[in-house]
Image (cartoon, rainbow, N blue to C red):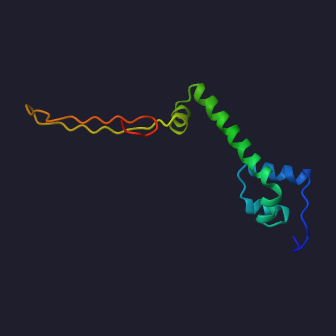
Amino acid sequence: MAQGKEHIPDDKTRLLVKSLSAVGIRYVDIAHKLGINDETLRKHYKQELEDGRIDANASIGNTLFQQAKNGNTSAAIFWLKTRANWKETTVTEHALGEGQDVKGINILLVEADGNKT
């Protein structure tokens, strides 16, 4: 775009920006497509950039949620780890020789928010 020429958004460019943002196209590439710089893009299309990203995340989130509800174990595990703060833990057991007594056991409980109890 020629320097000094004002960019005026219209319905067509607003829809294009929202659509490209929704599929993860970089801002600099969206700006190039419109013939403007990324600063002008953010100035005139802030709402479309945010709405596109939010709508796409909501759509994928809904698909993941439905997959988890329908028995997709991987989707359910991912959902619980990212949304319910579940995590996997590793337990290491040490075997003593036959006849040796265990000297003590330490137990550490961790709440869902990561705080130790």
Check the image and report above or below for 11 versus 87. Answer: below
Check the image and report above or below for 25 versus 65. Answer: below
Q: State left or right for residue 22 relative to residue 2.
A: left
Q: Residue 25's image quarter?
A: bottom right
| Residue 42 image position (x, y, % from top left) | 77, 59
| Residue 58 image position (x, y, % from top left) | 69, 38
Q: Residue at x 70, y 52 (%)?
A: 24
Q: State left or right for residue 98 relative to residue 91.
A: left
Q: Quadrant of the C terminus?
A: top left
Check the image and report above or below for 74 versus 38. Answer: above
Which is more toward the observer, 1 or 43?
43
Name the outermost residue toward the left.
Answer: 99
Q: Residue at x 56, y 25 (%)?
A: 71
Q: Residue at x 38, y 36 (%)?
A: 110
Q: State left or right for residue 76 relative to residue 105.
A: right
Q: Residue at x 91, y 67 (%)?
A: 6
